[in-house]
Amino acid sequence: MHRDLAPEQKVEEITKLNRDMMVKDTFSEAGSPNQNPSEALGVKPLKLGTEMIINRTGAPPSFWPWIVRYIAGVNNHCASPMLNWKTPISQHHGYTPDISAYLQFQFWERIWYRSDEKYPDSKEKPGHWLGVADHVGDLLTYYIYDPDTKRILARSVIRTADPKRDAIPNLHYEPSEIDDDDNIIPEVEDETSNATQPRRSPCIQEQYKQNLVNMLKYSKLALATCLLISSIEIPCISSYQSSNISAIPTVDNVIEEKLPTFKTPQSQSINHIKMQLQYVNAIEDAKDDDWSFIPQ
């Protein structure tokens, strides 16, 4: 076994194991990596490939072990002239490997993966593709990085989030929520832990506000209808002359005039509707950047 003079490779355990296996130990000269062909044919291509992927994908340098693993996996699935145009897997195991798993995504590609969030939260969460999970699940199971929990997960139900590949966006998340910094220390997946709940985006709050405004319109109409049916003093619309069409009472006028004097066994329900109207009226008058009245 020819290798360099790294101290971790000259420990007594490795030396004893090589003696037991009758393996000869040889070392390269200090400061002469060219004497070790493994450096030029194996380690150097991995280092160059790691640098290239970091530059082209923007992956954090702390993920270099996963990049090396990805490059090694690609090389094991590619034919080599040194092996008479066979793949390393075919040469070692005797079968032709399937490259489908490596054609679906690129390293550090933004993806959406299926999560276990409860209804009505989104069932998708953002992540980054790290490579193929060779020993977990089926052939199309992948390792992904979850920026929310900072963990490495193995998942098979994923889809791309790259807009250049015509990905359907998930507006439940803001773009900033799937951006990551360079100082990342990923953790191993823990199936017993619970993922944190994602925060709501402004578009969700805007939709929530619009739903409340729509509720205001229907609540006003329902209240005015109740008052018109219960009061015999309100004239029918047909009694108004076409020349005086402006005198027809509006929904707001009916509520303003008849609600203070309206007393029936359903008065408690009417008062409840009135309180709702006061709450939703505040929403109509609120500024766009004022969300103090909306529950988080």
Image (tube, grey):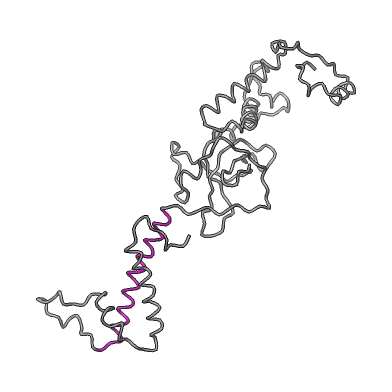
Residue 216 appears left or right of 49: left
Q: Which residues are magenta?
A: 203-232
Viewer-side residue, 112 vs 100: 112
Q: Position of residue 133 (x, y in %)?
A: 65, 38
> Which of the 4 image quadrants contains residue 141?
top right
Residue depicted at 66% across the width and 28% down the height: 96
| 231 falls in the magenta region | yes
The N terminus - image quarter: top right
Query: Of helix, strand and loop, which mostly describes the magenta segment?
Result: helix
Residue 142 lies left or right of residue 208; in this view the side is: right
Which residue occupies the foreground of this view, 272 or 67? 272
Tell me what residue is drawn at x 66 percent, y 21 percent: 86
Where does the image place residue 190, in percent across and percent down from the top left? 68, 48
Residue 145 placement (x, y as % from top left): 59, 41
Answer above or below: position of 32 versus 133: above
Residue 222 lies, in percent from the top left, at: 33, 76
Q: Which residue is rendered at x = 58% and y = 51% of the image?
A: 115
The answer to whether residue 7 is left or right of residue 265 is right
**Between 129 and 64, the one nearer to me in the picture:** 64
Q: Is residue 29 magenta?
A: no
Please tell me which residue lies in front, 72 or 17. 17
Whether residue 29 sits left or right of residue 123 in the image: it is right
Is residue 168 placed above or below 75 in the rendered structure? below
